[in-house]
Structure formats: structure tokens, C-alpha cells
Image (spheres, grey):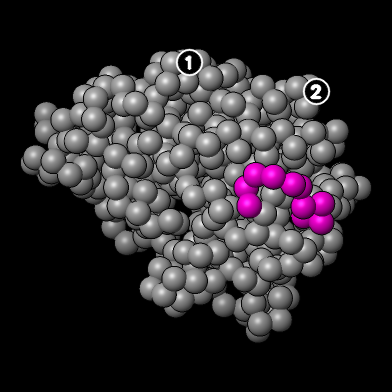
Amino acid sequence: MLTFPKDFRWGVSTSAFQIEGAVHEDGRGESIWDRFAHTPGKILNNDNADVACDHYHRYADDVKLIKDLGFKSYRFSIAWPRIIPTGRGPVNEKGLDFYRRLVDALLENDILPNATLYHWDLPTALGGWEFRETAEAFAAYADIVTRRLGDRVKTWCTFNEPWCSSLLSYQRGEHAPGIKDPALALQVAHHILLAHGMAMPLIRANCPDGEAGIVLNILPSEPLTSSAADYEAYRFHDGYFNRWFLDPLFGRRYPADTVADYVKMGWLESAEPAYIQPGDFETISAPLDYIGVNYYERAVLRAVPGKEMQTGEISVWKAPPEQMTEMKWEIYPDGLLSALLAVYYDYRPPKIYVAENGASYTDPIGPDGQINDQRRIDYIDRHVRAVHRAIQAGVPMAGYYVWSLMDNFEWGNGYACTFGLVHVDYATQKRLPRASAYWYGEVTRRNGLEEK
């Protein structure tokens, strides 16, 4: 039996925008994702999240489902536009009441709440993360929420995947607000990291017996060959995706090699642009109680001569189709092990959670009314074993969360992807646990896996 530490946290993850729906109810304001999802052509099939999983109205049943399936912790996000509809100003008590009810229901069912303050749904009225004032507004919002809920919620995350909120959204333009401006993307990344640092001491003051950290999507990288060109592509990609966020969080400022790249490419006007103010890096590097790692795939880099330094174009080797999920992401559990080892031994956070890990697979409802998603079971099994290997290697792993509790609005892919342990029929909102849900429930009850 591969047994995990007795206090290891087994959980499931969701985010507010992807499941709640009720976007016009009880005073909720508009978010950048509401606007983006209603822009024709931005979302597959022009889907939107106006209803999604209707979790806002069905949260009590969803909590009961979490309990019945045996999951020990629920990682969810709080929608800033529900709490402060325009991003700053008066509190919308009806919005805050929803999260009070949700947290109370979790605790009544012996489920540990794990709350994320920002999972991409910025109030539109704030204008965007390019403004330093947005970081200040976030700190005020974090202060309000943790003061109101900090007596019951003991695990807090400031931001989920800041790479997505900055470079994917402002450089590549694939996520809201859909801008393609590399220089602006780096300014956004700085303000998000600054907002995180501003919020950390407030969370500690409001929840002194709790823990607070940040969740990064880590993409472990390696060169395709031993050629100097491929190594250079790998170095560039690792700086672009991983080190740009990890280094400043741990007091190292931005990586010097990547700064030099960006100055050469015109993404930075200088090594220290005007939006970086004195004291910013000290703020950003506020001590962390944990780092959350979201892992889905690795990146194997091959050189595109001249392209990286000219445009930031990165060429990633793709695995054969039989080694991919339906999202065309490589199934590579060793990459999770590599990510955990690298984060811990390079930066030494006090502990690490795998905050998201999962796969999109579409399997039909069988004649018996059940869904046999063996591929998802195999995927999770192999990645949980990688976590156990990390523990054996000395990494202080504190928990593992599957993405996701249920099928949901998967951003640009709309409802075409099915990551859920639980199937959702969007026409009826009926929940149907897949075989993987029952299997994972048994893993949590046993606190481990059978040896192979």
C-alpha cells in the first residue's frame, strides 16, 4: 500500500466563473470574462457561463455530493464581482452571504474549505490589471473577504495561475480581455504579483491561525535534443513560463537572463521599467505558507532559429496522439514529479499542494446508466503515484486536488471539454458521478493506493 501522510489533504477543485452561473443575480457585477464570453467568436460554439452548472442555486446539493463521494477538501474561488460589483467601494452583502452559506455547508459536512480570491473574473469596471490601482483594489477586496470569512476558512490562495491572467490574456490574447501586447502583459504580470504581495499580510492579520499562498501553473521544460539551440529554446521558455513568477515570489526579482531577452525583444523598455516602483519586490516576496502547483503537461522545446528572440514564438514538441488527453495535452506523470522536485529544491517553500491535476475525457453513459471513465482513473492514478514519489524524495507535499469536481465552462473551449469526476447534463443540471469519482473517493478513504 502506498500510504500518504495522515494529514494529507485529498480534494477537488472548481472556480466561481466556471460553475456558478447566476451572473445577473443578487447584485453581482460584470466581469471581464462575462464580456469576453459574450463577444462573438471568442468561445467555442459561442458558449457562455450565464448558467454554467447553476452552482449558485445548487450549492447545497453539490456539497452533499462532495460529502457522499468521500472527498475531504473543496477548493473553490470567490467571485470578486459578487463581493464588490465594481471592484472597489461598498460590499454587496448578498454576494458575501452566498459564500458564508457555502462555507458553513462545507464545515457542517466535515469538508475543509480552500478558498481562492482570484480565478480570473476581474470586475470590468476596474479597467484591467495594467493599472496599479487594480492591485490596490485587490488588496482591499482580499482584506474584506478574509475578515468576514477568516474565522471559518483556514486555507487561502491569492491568485490562481497568474501566467494565464497576464501572458495568456494580454500577450497571446487567448483569454479575457483578449489583448495582444507583450509589453502590457509584463506590466499586468507585475501588478498581479504586487497585488498578491499586498494581500498576504492582510490575510495573515485576518486569519492568524490559517495559511496563505499562491497557485502557479508549472510547465516543466526540457530541450528536445542536446543541441545548443534547443537548450537555448528551453532556457527561454522556462524563464517565460516558470521563473518569471517563481523568482520574484521568493525574493530573487525577475530572472536576469529573461529580462535581457525581453529588453532585446522590445517587451521591456529597460531592465527596470517605470511601473516597477521602489519596494515592489520586497512586497511581492512576502513569506508564503505554501505554493500550489497546477500540472497538466510538460513542454519539450525545439529551436525555431531566431524566432524566440524576435517574437517570443516557442516551438513545443508534441507527443503521439495515443499519449495525449482529448485536450491534446501529453500524459506525462513524470513531469509532475519533475515540477514538484524543481519547485521545492530550487525555492524551498514550506509545503506544496497539487492544486489542480486532471484530464478531459468524453465517455458515454452506458446501458446501466453509469459512466466508465477508466482513462481518467488511470490518469489520476499515475499522477497520484508521482506525488508519492515526490514525498519519498523529501518534498513536503500537503495535498492533491483533482480538476475538477464536475464538468464546467472550460474557458475558450466552452462546454466541449469534460474534466469532471461528475458528469453534468446542462439541460437538466443533473449530476452523475463517473466511475472515477467513486474510485477517487476510495483513494481518499484509504489515504493511498495499492502498490503495483
| In magenta stretch: residue 301 | no
Q: In terms of image quadrants, where is residue 245? A: top left
> What quarter of the picture does the N terminus occupy?
top right
In the rendered image, the vertical position of residue 96 relative to residue 355, given as above or below: below
The residue segment tinted magenta is: 86-95
Residue in the picture at 24% in, 25% down:
270
- Tell me the residue that label 2 is attached to: 209
- Tell me the residue that label 1 is attached to: 279
Residue in the picture at 65% in, 77% down:
425
Q: Position of residue 195 (x, y in %)?
A: 55, 32
Residue kind at label 1, given as amino acid type? Gly
In the rendered image, the vertical position of residue 392 relative to residue 327, given as above or below: above
| 200 with respect to 91 (left or right) | left
In the rendered image, the vertical position of residue 57 relative to residue 180, given as above or below: below
The residue tagged with tag 2: helix, strand or loop? loop
Q: Position of residue 350 (x, y in %)?
A: 61, 19
Q: Position of residue 242 (x, y in %)?
A: 38, 33
Q: Nearer the viewer, residue 382 or 271?
A: 271
Residue kind at label 2, given as amino acid type? Asp
In the rendered image, the vertical position of residue 57 relative to residue 128, given as above or below: below
Q: Residues within 10 Å of mark 2 (few under 14, many from 20)?
A: few
Residue in the picture at 57% in, 58% down:
31
Q: Residues within 10 Å of mark 1 (few under 14, many from 20)?
A: few
Q: Position of residue 312 (x, y in %)?
A: 21, 42
